[in-house]
Image (cartoon, rainbow, N blue to C red):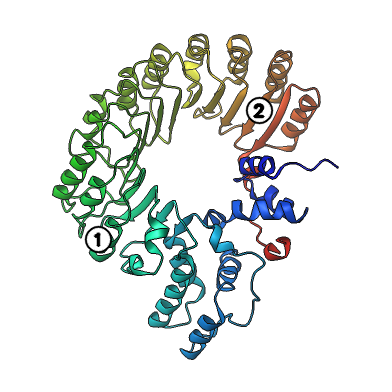
Amino acid sequence: MFKLNRDILYLIFEELQDDKNTLYSCLSVNKTWSEIIVPILWKDPWKYSKWGNDKLLLNIIISHLSDKSKNGLKDQGIDFLTNSYQKPLFNYIRFCRRLNLIAIDRIIDTIIYIYSKSKILIIKNEIYNLFINENTKFTHLYMPNKFDHQIHLISGAKHCFADIEFFSCNTSINDNVLTGLLEICNSIKELELFIEVTDNNYEIVKLIKAQKKLSKIHFLTNYSISPKSDESFCIILENSLIKHANTIRYFKITKPPITSMLSSFVNLITLELDDDYGNFRDITWLENLSLPFLQILRASRVQIKALTSLIGNTNGSLIEIKIDYVSHDEINNKKLIQVIYQNCPNLEYLKLVFRNSNILELENLLIKCQHLNELFFIISDLLTFNWETLFIILTKSSPISLFKFEFDFFELPKLNSLKLFFDNWKGRHPMLLQFCRINKELSDLIEIYKSEGIVKQYNNDYSLENCENYDNYEENCW
C-alpha cells in the first residue's frame, strides 16, 4: 500500500483540526498517524474541554508531573491522583501552543475543590511550571481576571512567551504581572481586552504601545454602561489604539467608543458589533461612521437604522454581512435590503431577516449580487411567510455561485413548496442545506433529492452538536 509522505499527512490532518471526532478515530490507525495527530490536538487542548471531560484532561496533565513533584505534593498533604497514572506515551504538554490559564484555573477550581485555597494554589503552581519551561513556545496566552501569579519569573518564561501573537486579559490585570510581560511580549498581533468599570490598570497602555504589528482588537465589556464607568481610562486606552490605526484590520466592540477611534481605522477589513448588554442606545457614532474598505460586517443586537447607514458608507468592498438578534419593522427591513444590493456588488455571504412583504426585494438582491454563494434566511413572520414565492425567486434568479442555504424559522415550509424548489434546481450546483429543525417527513424528502444529486448535504442545528469524547484518549495514542 502506498505510504503518504508525513508532510502530506500533516497538511491533511491540519485541515481536520476542528473535527476532533475524525482525528480521534485516526489516532489508532498506526504509529505514524498518531505521531502526526497528537501535536495537532494538543496545540489547543482547551477548546475540547467541557464539563465531563475536564477531569480526564486534568489527569493527563498531572501524569506529566515528575516523581519529585508528586512526592512534594504528598508531603504537603495533597495526594489526589498521584498514583493513578503512569507516564504518558507522549509529552503532550510540549505540543501546547495556547496557554489558557483561565481554563487551567477553572478546571482545578471545579475538580479539586476539597482542598484549602493555599493547597489549591500549590497545585496551580505545579501545573504552571509544567507548561512554562525551555521546551515549550506559546503563540496564545489567556490570563484570568485578577490573576496575580508572576509567571514571568518561572524559569523558561522568556523563551515561552517571546513569540506570543495573541494575548487576552482583563484591564484590571495585576501590575506586577503586567510589568513582567512588558519585558517579554512585543510581538502581539491580536489583543483581547475585557474592560472593567473600575480598578483598571493604566499601565496596559504601555503594552499596547510596545507592539509593532497589532492588527486585531477585541474591545469587550461584560456590563452595561453606567455613570461609574472608568471613562478617563477608556479615553486613554482608545487613544493608544488610534496610534495603531494603520495596521488594525479587525475590530470587535461591545459598547460605543468615547473617542472617534473607529473612524481612524482607515484600513479596517472586519468589524464586529455585539450589543449584548444594551449599550448601543446612542447610534450616532455608527450612523456617521465611514469605513470604505470594510469587507466583513457582523452585527448582533444592533439597530437596523445604524447598520443601514454604515453599509451605505462603504465602498462596494463588503463580501460578508451577518446581522441577527435585532427586531425591526418592514420598512426598515426593506431599506436594509435595498442598501445592501445597491452598495455590495461583491457580496458572498448574507445572514439577514427577510420579512414576507419584502421577499420581492430578494430578487433585486440576487440579480445585483452575482458573487453570492451562501444565504442565511431568518424568517420572523409567524405562520404567514410565503415559502413558495421565496423558492420560486431562488430558483429563478440565484446567481450560479449560490448553492448554500440556511433557514431559521418558526414554521416548517410545506413539503410541496420544497419539492417544487428541488425540482426546479435540477442541473445546478448541488445545494448545501441547513435548517434550524427538521422532522421525519422533511428528512425523507431531502434524502430522495440527495440520492438524485440535487442536494449534496443537509443538517439541522442539533445534528451539528458533536458529542465530546475523551474516552480512551491515552489508549488511542501510541
Q: Which residue is mark 1?
A: 179
User: Residue shown at 79%/43% (left/top)?
Assistant: 3
Q: Which residue is most to the left?
A: 232
Q: Which residue is mark 2?
A: 432
User: Residue shown at 25%/65% (left/top)?
Assistant: 176
User: Residue shown at 21%/57% (left/top)?
Assistant: 200
Q: Is residue 31 left or right of residue 330?
A: right
Q: Amino acid at mark 1?
A: Thr
User: Residue shown at 71%/13% (left/top)?
Assistant: 424
**Mark 2–mark 1 distance (CA, rounded to whole Å):** 51 Å
Q: Is residue 412 left or right of residue 268?
A: right
Q: Amino acid at mark 2?
A: Leu
Question: In front: 136, or 335?
Answer: 136
Quarter holding the C terminus? bottom right
For label 1, the SS is helix
Q: Which residue is most to the right?
A: 1
- In front of the other: label 2 or label 1? 1
For the residues bearing labels 2 and 1, Cβ distance under 8 angstroms: no
For label 2, the SS is strand
What crowding class fits label 1: few (fewer than 14 Cα within 10 Å), some (14-19), or many (20 or more)? some
The quadrant in which residue 455 appears is top right
Spot occupied by residue 376 in the image (x, y as percentages of width and height): 53, 28
Spot occupied by residue 235 in the image (x, y as percentages of width and height): 16, 44
The vertical placement of 231 against 428, above or below, is below
**Mark before the other along the chain sequence, 2 or 1:** 1
